[in-house]
Image: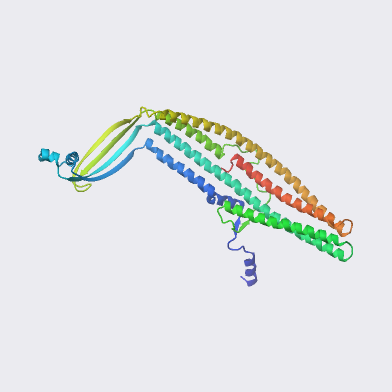
Amino acid sequence: MSLPLLLLVTALAPPADTVPLSLEDALARARTANAAVQAAEAGSAAADARVWQATRAFLPSTRVELQGLRTTDPVGVFGLKLRQERFAMEDLALDALNRPEAIGGFSTTLGVEMPLLAPEGWFGFSAARSAAVAEEAGARRMAGAVRLQVSQAYWNAQWAARSVAALDTALAAARAHTAQAEAMERQGLVTGLDARMARIASREVEIRLEQARVERDIARSQLATLLGMAPDADLTLTDALTTSVGATCVQEDCDLAGRGDLEALTAGRDAAAAQARSAWWAQLPQVMGFAAVVHHGQDTPWGTGSGDWTVGLGMRWALFPGLSGIGAVREAGAQRRAVDAQLEGARLQAEAEVRAARQRVQLATRALELATAAEAEARTALEQARLRYRTGISPVTELLDVQATATQTALSLWTARRDLLVARAALDFAYGAHDR
């Protein structure tokens, strides 16, 4: 590569720490790096773990116990010798029974317990599973909300950058007007008032430009924060602020079926119903089977000794635990009714949000049409005002007023484009199109 070409490539290449970022790149990064999304997914994982914990209602549980002891307790010595198969005739002597010598040993137990009839646990498992579904749907809704926030922040940052560019152009034009007025003053064509008015207008634009630069930096910092990056990250936003970026639900092709908060409440209703059944069945007995194999060692846990086994059935029934059982059933029923009411209210709210979002898209579309026409008219008017002032037909105040109008219409056009893109993203969010 020749030296001039190398220098050109080096000059055009972005700095090493600059991050090129399209909107899709930003959305993908937020999916994995945004703190709110990560927290919601962790909560969903915790709910999944609780489902595993609830499997004790129908799966066997095993335990292993190892115990070592040394004792002179008469009952303990008698039992240890029997279990270790070391009991002899001399151990039946009264002195040996009442004042035995110290003896030690080990007991190793392998036990299994299997629920046979435990409806409380079965419905508890169902409630845990529905709660996990609700958490997962809530996490997807959070991801959709973050997607909306990132879209808004991205287009706000681009709008702020375009505002800076428009005010840069306006400042250059104001300074050109000032230079023109000063030249005409030197020629005796106008008074010094024209140049003074032009300088005032130039300074006003300069103030607005400084404010716009600050807003641009703030908008970029907000976007970087949503993406889990340092607020001062050097971002290069590559998607232009145009309305060619479409939305998923602009046409009548979406419904509320995939909206995460509604799915979460539906699953929450199922969880509440299962919890109510679990609370009712908790008042009835539970039946379980159990088995255990024990080895009684003399000197080591698994050495010389003997073993035994036990199998059996058991029933557990809290016949009268005060009024706690009645309270648990009533509480579960009330929670179910509360979730039903929340779900119905959420559905109505979702329908209202979709309706409002569609109206905002329609309004933003119309506003963009009007802003586009106004900006074109303002550019034409500015050319006419420049010609009128240059030929002495109109005062400088007319030119400055038309220039201010042209600047404002340019800013309004960029604002209308931003508003339409944000309104489309909000419509997608209202439908839950990106709750995944």
Q: Position of residue 154 (x, y in %)?
A: 63, 51
Residue 264 screen position, x and y as percent: 52, 38
Quadrant assignment for the N terminus: bottom right
Q: Can residue 125 be seen?
A: yes
Q: Is residue 156 above or below residue 84?
A: below
Q: Determine the residue positioned at 76% across, 60% down.
A: 172
Give the image quarter of residue 323.
top left
Q: Give the colour scheme of this rendering.
A: rainbow
Q: Residue at x 57, y 47 (%)?
A: 146
Q: Quadrant of the C terminus?
A: top right
Does residue 191 appear to the left or right of 350 in the view shown?
right
Q: Position of residue 122 (x, y in %)?
A: 40, 33
Q: Count how many numbered circles sit on residues in the image.
A: 0
Question: Visible in this render: residue 247?
Answer: no
Q: Nearer the viewer, residue 170 or 354?
A: 170
Farthest-out residue, bottom: 3
Residue 117 figure quarter: top left
The residue lying toward the viewer, choosing from 7 and 209, is 209
What residue do we see at 81% from left, 61% from top?
178
> Which of the 4 quarters of the picture holds residue 198?
bottom right
